[in-house]
C-alpha cells in the first residue's frame, strides 16, 4: 500500500476537466483531497494533512491509470501463444511503463490457448485490479463478419459448449463477443449473466430488427466487422450510436475508424458509455516488421497489423495514450474528456471498485495514477514515486 502524501502537479486530469496547478491528497493509497489549495492551507485547515510527505510534480501532468479492455498482446507477447506467468508479469510491467495499469487479455476461441491463459493468470500473482479477467472474442459469431477470426474458431450457439467454456475459464471470463442474429443465441444470455459476463455484440450481420439482449450490453469495436449505419434496415452500428447499447468500444488508432466517424461517435455516445480500445496484438509497442498470430504471418506497419497473405486488418500496433491522443485529435475532445473513455468508463463496465482499481482522479479512488511529461511521451507511476508498491 502506498503511503500518505500531498502532491502538487502541473495539471490533474479530473473526470472531463483539467485542473491546472492542482493539489492531490492521499491517505493510505486513497485520494482524500482534490483541489487548488496548497499544502500549507490544507494543513492549517485540517489536521489530517499535517506531517504528510510532499511530492512536487509541477512539471508533470497527472493522469489516472489507463485500462486496455480489448488487447490481444503487446511487446512481442500474444495471449494466444502465452508461455506462462513470467511472460504475463513482464507484459504487465511493460504496460505500466506506458501508464496502462489495468488490462483485459483478449483471445479468440482455442481451447489450448484459453486454458494456458487461465493458468498463467492464476499463477502470475497479479491482482484482479491489474488483470480483472479474460475477454473472449467469439466463438458465437457470424462467419460472414469474422474479420481476422479463423473459421475453426467459430461455433454455433450451444448451451453445452458455453458451459464448457465457463468451466475452462474458471470464473475469469468477463466479456464475450457474440452475434445477436444467430439462431439459438438467446439461450446463452442468462448463462452469461449468471456467470457475471458482459455480453458484447460484434462480428455480426444484425439488422435493426434483430432482437437484442437486455438489460446492459456492450458493442465490440464499433464499425468494424458489423453492419453499419443504414436508413432502412438499420445495423449494429446504429444500435450503438442511437444509445441502445450501455457501452460501445471504439478502436481509435486512426486506422480502424477514420476521423469523421470518430467525430460522429463523440457527438452521439457520452463519455460514460464510450470505451476506447486498441485491439492491439503482439506487434504493438515494437518496431514495424513481420510477426505471427495464431501461427499465421502478419505484418505491422503504418497501416496497422494485417495478415501478410490477404492484407486483412486484424489489430493495432498502438497502445494506451496513443489511442487517447488519436481520438482527441480527431474529435476535438480535450485530453481530460478523452481519457475518461480509457480509464473510468472501462473500469465501470468491468465492475471494478474505484477504491481498489482507480481509474479516476476523485475522492475515494485509489492512487493508481501516473505522472506524465508535458509532451505525454513518458510517465512514472505515482505509487513508485511515493514509495509504495510498484
Image (cartoon, rainbow, N blue to C red):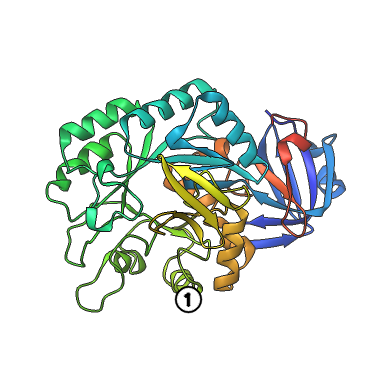
Is 50 or 107 nearer to us in this picture?
Answer: 107
State left or right for residue 232 relative to residue 277: left
Extreme residue in the left direction? 183
Extreme residue in the top direction? 123
Q: Does residue 328 appear anywhere in the picture? A: yes
Q: Does residue 345 appear anywhere in the picture? A: no
Q: Position of residue 327 (x, y in %)?
A: 55, 65
Residue located beneath label 1 in the image: 260
Q: Residue drawn 62% across and 55% down?
A: 321
Is 6 or 132 nearer to us in this picture?
Answer: 132
In the rendered image, which quarter contains the C terminus?
top right
Q: Residue drawn 53% across and 24% down?
A: 85
State left or right for residue 2 relative to residue 207: right
Q: Position of residue 36 (x, y in %)?
A: 77, 56
Q: Residue drawn 28% across and 64% down?
A: 236
Tally of marks: 1
Is 36 or 54 nearer to us in this picture?
Answer: 54
Q: Position of residue 152 (x, y in %)?
A: 26, 41
Extreme residue in the right direction? 40
In the rendered image, which quarter contains the N terminus?
top right
Q: Position of residue 231 (x, y in %)?
A: 25, 79
Q: Secondary structure at mark 1?
A: helix
State left or right for residue 165 relative to residue 383: left
Q: Residue drawn 71% across and 60% down?
A: 19
Above or below, 57 relative to 209: above
Q: Are there few (<14), some (14-19), or many (20+) residues within 10 Å of tag 1?
A: few
Extreme residue in the front direction? 309
Q: On the image, which quarter does residue 274 sit in?
A: bottom left
Amino acid at each position: 500500500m502506498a503511503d500518505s502524501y500531498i502532491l502538487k502537479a502541473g495539471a490533474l486530469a479530473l473526470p472531463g476537466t483539467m485542473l491546472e496547478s492542482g493539489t492531490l491528497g492521499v491517505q493510505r493509497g486513497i485520494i482524500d483531497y482534490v483541489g487548488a489549495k496548497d499544502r500549507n492551507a490544507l494543513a492549517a485547515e485540517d489536521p489530517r494533512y499535517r506531517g504528510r510527505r510532499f511530492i512536487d510534480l509541477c512539471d508533470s501532468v497527472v493522469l489516472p491509470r489507463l485500462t486496455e479492455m480489448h488487447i490481444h498482446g503487446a511487446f512481442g507477447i500474444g495471449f494466444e501463444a502465452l508461455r506462462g506467468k513470467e511472460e504475463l508479469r513482464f507484459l504487465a510491467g511493460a504496460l505500466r511503463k506506458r501508464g496502462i495499469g489495468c488490462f483485459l487479455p483478449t483471445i479468440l476461441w482455442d481451447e489450448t490457448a484459453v486454458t494456458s491463459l487461465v493458468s498463467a493468470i492464476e499463477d502470475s500473482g497479479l491482482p484482479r485490479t491489474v488483470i480483472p479477467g479474460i475477454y473472449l472474442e467469439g466463438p458465437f459469431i457470424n462467419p460472414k463478419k469474422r474479420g481476422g477470426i479463423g473459421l475453426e474458431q467459430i461455433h454455433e450457439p450451444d448451451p453445452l459448449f458455453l458451459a464448457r467454456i465457463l468451466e475452462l475459464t474458471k470464473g475469469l471470463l468477463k466479456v464475450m463477443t457474440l452475434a445477436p442474429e444467430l439462431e439459438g443465441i438467446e439461450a446463452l444470455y442468462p448463462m452469461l449473466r449468471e456467470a457475471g459476463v458482459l455480453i458484447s455484440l460484434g462480428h455480426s450481420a444484425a439488422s435493426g430488427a434483430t432482437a437484442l439482449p437486455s438489460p446492459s450490453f456492450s458493442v465490440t469495436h464499433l464499425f468494424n466487422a458489423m453492419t453499419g449505419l443504414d436508413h432502412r434496415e438499420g445495423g449494429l452500428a446504429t444500435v450503438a450510436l442511437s444509445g441502445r447499447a450501455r457501452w460501445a468500444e471504439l478502436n481509435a488508432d486512426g486506422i480502424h475508424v477514420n476521423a469523421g466517424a470518430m467525430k460522429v461517435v463523440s457527438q452521439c455516445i457520452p463519455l460514460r458509455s464510450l470505451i476506447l480500445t486498441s485491439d492491439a496484438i503482439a506487434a504493438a509497442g515494437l518496431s514495424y516488421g513481420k510477426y505471427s498470430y495464431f501461427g499465421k504471418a502478419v505484418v505491422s506497419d503504418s497501416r496497422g497489423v494485417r495478415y501478410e497473405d490477404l492484407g486483412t486488418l486484424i489489430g493495432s500496433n498502438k497502445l494506451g495514450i496513443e489511442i487517447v491522443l488519436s481520438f482527441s485529435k480527431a474529435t476535438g475532445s480535450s485530453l481530460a474528456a478523452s481519457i475518461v473513455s480509457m480509464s473510468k468508463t472501462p473500469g465501470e463496465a468491468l465492475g471494478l471498485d474505484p477504491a481498489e482499481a482507480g481509474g479516476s482522479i476523485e475522492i475515494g479512488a485509489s492512487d493508481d495514477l501516473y505522472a506524465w511529461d508535458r509532451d505525454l511521451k513518458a510517465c512514472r507511476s505515482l505509487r513508485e514515486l511515493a514509495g509504495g508498491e510498484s
